Image: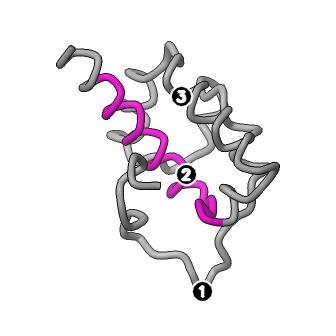
Amino acid sequence: MDTLCNAIDRRAGLMQKMMDRLNVDLEASALVALGTKLGGAARACFFCRHADECQRWFEAGAGDDGYRRFCPNADRFEALPHRMPDQMTSAPMPGKWSDQ
């Protein structure tokens, strides 16, 4: 059971990092289509076969659009609402994905 919980936590962390990197507005995204698009993104992250590649991309600096090669949510994240420039910070979004 610990292995499953660790996998879920890892995937949730990667999803949060990707959304932060792409400036996705989590609160506004939760309201789109009653949250179904965000829920679909969470399921895609959970079942994604590219978590290791995603992690390596972040470790390399995540400075380009290389995520488009492996992320099944690339188009979905880009279609969700984004934070305005005055809302963006270099710090991670507050709270954990599981708190949302």
Residue 51: image quadrant is top left
Vertical side of 56 occupied by 25: above or below: below
Residue 86 marker: 1
Separation (CA) of disc 3 from disc 2: 11 Å
Upstream in sequence: badge 1 or badge 2: 2
Q: Image quadrant for the N terminus?
A: top left
What SS does tag 1 mark?
helix
Residue 28: image quadrant is bottom right
Asked if disc 3 and disc 2 are in contact, CB closer than 8 Å, the reply is: no
Magenta span includes 11: yes
Taking the image as shown, residue 54 lies to the left or right of residue 37, namely left
Taking the image as shown, residue 28 lies to the left or right of residue 54, namely right
Residue 44: image quadrant is top right
Q: Name the residue under label 2.
A: 19
Separation (CA) of disc 1 from disc 2: 17 Å
Which residue is painted at 74% across and 61% down in the image? 81
Which residue is painted at 82% across and 49% down in the image? 33
Q: Is the magenta stretch mostly helix, strand or loop?
A: helix
Which residue is painted at 65% across and 71% down in the image? 83
Q: How crowded is mark 1: few (under 14 residues within 10 Å), some or many (20 or more)?
A: few
Upstream in sequence: badge 3 or badge 2: 2
Residue 50 marker: none
The percent position of residue 43, horizontal first and vertical second, equals 58, 26
Q: Which amino acid does label 1 sit on?
A: Asp
The range drawn in magenta is 7-27
Q: What residue type is labelled 2?
A: Met
The percent position of residue 31, horizontal first and vertical second, equals 73, 59
Upstream in sequence: badge 3 or badge 1: 3
Quick one: 99 or 84, which is closer to the camera? 99
